[in-house]
Amino acid sequence: MRVAVVAGPDPGHAFPAIALCLRFLEAGDEPVLFTSPRWFDAALAAGIGVRRLKGLAPRAEDDDGDAGARIHQRAAFISTEILPEMSAMLPDLVVSDVLTVGGGMAAERLRLPWVELSPHPLYLPSKGLPPIGSGLAIGEGLSGRARDSVLRGLTSRAIRRGEQQREQARESVGLPPEDPGPTARLVATLPALEVPRPDWPDNAHLVGPLLWEPTEHLLDLPPGDEPLVMVAPSTAETGVSDMVSTVLEALDGAGVRVAVSTLDTPPAELPSWATAGLGRQDEILRHAAVTIGGGGHGLLAKSLLSGVPLVTVPGGGDQWELANRAARQGSSILVRPFTTEAVRDAVDRILAEPSYAAAARSAASGIAVVSDPVGVCHDVLESAQTA
């Protein structure tokens, strides 16, 4: 099966796409990744074909202050930009990241079946949940259900505006305004991070986290036998700033070691009980007792799969939602406001109370019941060919 996989440059979206491409390769398929050149060398080294995802740069007419316009109008433009190369590679199937809507539009324009990849829980609005992003648990009792209903009403106008923007964007490239949506949705998360909903789509499949390490380098760990804390600053633009310096100040004298895992240039000066740099996080987590991060899905899922509890310091985007879900599941402590005292207290609590690690191990056990994403894609293609 020849499959085009489309994802933007943000690590939280590009890395799961690369992980999926590797799964396709293992199954004997031929994936081609449309993404930013930033990841070309690593993808090529892994045997994945690459194409530049054109159309990502903002245009003069784009309104980046309007999220709906940014997603949908630029998606239409991206679909036009990548259409020639996608058509030339003759794919059987397209997999498009949930934020890179242009991949799905291009597939429709070529009359190809396509699958949506959500590298996190399912964020579609639901008639049974509070609005996604609120971080709230499902309301209980009459008052709780009434609260959720009111909140859904407050967000319904924005949702409808987004739908209208997508309709207009689709019409601008010759597609019918009504969006039929993907044939299937790959929801790449752990069951423990999902929330039961009465309107779970029939075509949505929990496939477990899709994780990829951008390096083979192993980061040297600080000497000693004190508990190891892995710190991973958020790769998202909406993450909190100065995480590393604040955490190092908080944990000075706490009787722990710290390994800072970062894609960016590490701090120039570190105490003797800390190290920093680019290294395989899965290897660091083999030795870690606690993770500190922004609550992004990639780090959260990776840490839970390793049975390591977290201190989450959420920024914007979906980090608040995920941080609250992990806290309710019992595997994490959410820190806000972000102060040295709060970080120190959270790390001390996790090290002292075994329940957090037990909850992380419980979350990891959910990987046993997820579906195979490649199998889902093969089923989609088979159904399309026999339709």
Image: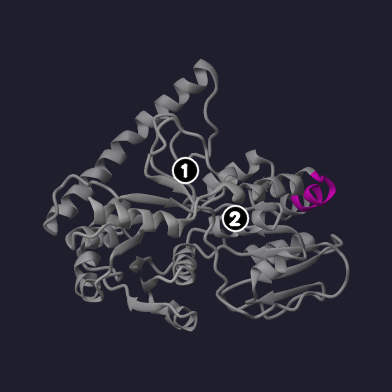
| Closest to the observer, 147 or 270 | 147
Magenta residues, start to end: 346-354
Residue that mark 2 sits on: 301
Q: CA distance from mark 1 to mark 2?
A: 18 Å
Q: From the viewer's perspective, tell me whether residue 18 is left or right of residue 268.
A: left
Three-letter code, disc 2: Ala
Q: Position of residue 53 (x, y in %)?
A: 31, 72
Residue at image position (21%, 72%) is 87
Residue 350 painted magenta: yes
Q: Most prominent secondary structure in the magenta stretch?
A: helix
Picture disc at residue 92: none
Residue 17 painted magenta: no
Three-letter code, disc 1: Gly
The quadrant where residue 105 appears: bottom left
Q: Position of residue 142 (x, y in %)?
A: 50, 16
Q: Position of residue 309 (x, y in %)?
A: 71, 52
- Residue 92 visible at all: yes
Residue that mark 1 sits on: 133
